[in-house]
Image: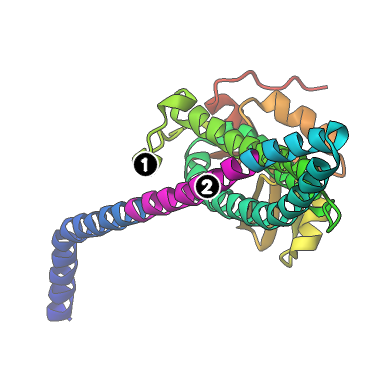
Amino acid sequence: MKTSALLTLALVALMALAQPAWAQAQAQRDALIRAELSDRQATELRNAENIVASADLIAQQLAAMALQYEQNLKTIESGRGREKRQARRENKQLDEQGAQKWEQCLRLYAQGYRAMTDLYKVRLEVFAEAMPTKRPELINAYSQLDREFQSANQRMAAWNSRTTLDRRQEGGKAAIGDMAEGIEALRQSFCLFINCKPDQISNEPWTIEPVRDEGLVVFQVQVVAVRQPLSQDQLQGITKGFLDVKYVFEDGLHKYSVGTFQFYDDARAFSEQVGGGAFVVAFQNGQKIPDILQAIQTAGQPLPQRP
């Protein structure tokens, strides 16, 4: 019995000695993984930017074609017989060439901008996890991005075989502008998180680490607690389309909360708007605080007055 106890104590001691070395090795591995991811993401971002640059070149060619098209229209309107016929032939060719080039151009823009969007979203989620009070701005940026890309798609969907080059030029430039504005919304969010101006963003922003809101208490509104996890459709219906949904499994229940508030009063006001038994919960460093009054005090805010 004594020998077994001594062996157990010896094993615990060895594990205690080995733990710092193991933790250090784990930290080194994590750092290498982060560096590898950063390098790969930076490369992917440059590839996406190169795709957009290729689309820019085609857009410049289309702009030159559009100028020629406009000149031909003037000739058709005021020129003589042979000049008019020549101008019509040229514009017919420009319509055909323009249709192909605009399809290629917008496909490249969409491909490049979507790749950039995915990269920014991955990185922004890291910041949002570390700085939850700024997540509402990020949600707004995501919503704007979706609206801009939907607008671009609608513009392109309106084209058909009879759409002339000048009409394509007008709608295509607007579609490109929509997609660019969507990307700019994400860039602005990135600036918000790293506290810099848009023109100060590094070409390789993936090496920037977020300053975590360590110790910060954030309030959310719990909208449902169920014994079985919700499907995606059920979740969207109950959380009223909120993108900022937090999930915890606690006391045998699947609990879902929405919103991120720095002040309890704001969260309580929102819970009253939601209704249906919604109430305020609090988190600190990603962990739920069981006692809401304790959370309010920890946040340094006044306790609610009893009715």
Between 84 and 110, the residue placed more toward the observer is: 84
Numbered label attached to residue 52: 2
Between 217 and 149, the residue placed more toward the observer is: 149
What residue lies at 66% left-to-right and 21% top-to-bottom? 303
Give the mark nearest the N terminus, 1 or 2: 2
Asked whether residue 50 is drawn in magenta, I would say yes
Which residue is label 1 attached to?
Answer: 204
Q: Are marks 1 and 2 in contact (CB under 8 Å)?
A: no
Which image quarter holds the N terminus? bottom left
Numbered label attached to residue 175: none
What residue lies at 79% left-to-right and 62% top-to-bottom? 233
What residue lies at 68% left-to-right and 35% top-to-bottom? 67
Q: Amino acid at mark 1?
A: Glu
Q: Position of residue 88 (x, y in %)?
A: 81, 47
What residue lies at 83% left-to-right and 34% top-to-bottom? 79
Helix, strand or loop at disc 1? loop
Which image quarter holds the C terminus? top right
* Residue 1 in sight from this viewpoint: yes
Q: Position of residue 15 (x, y in %)?
A: 18, 65
Identify whether 202 is placed above or below 304: below
User: Left or right: 259 with respect to 84?
Assistant: left
Q: Which residues are magenta?
A: 39-63
Helix, strand or loop at disc 2? helix
Looking at the rendering, which quadrant does residue 133 occupy? top right
Asked whether residue 26 is drawn in magenta, I would say no
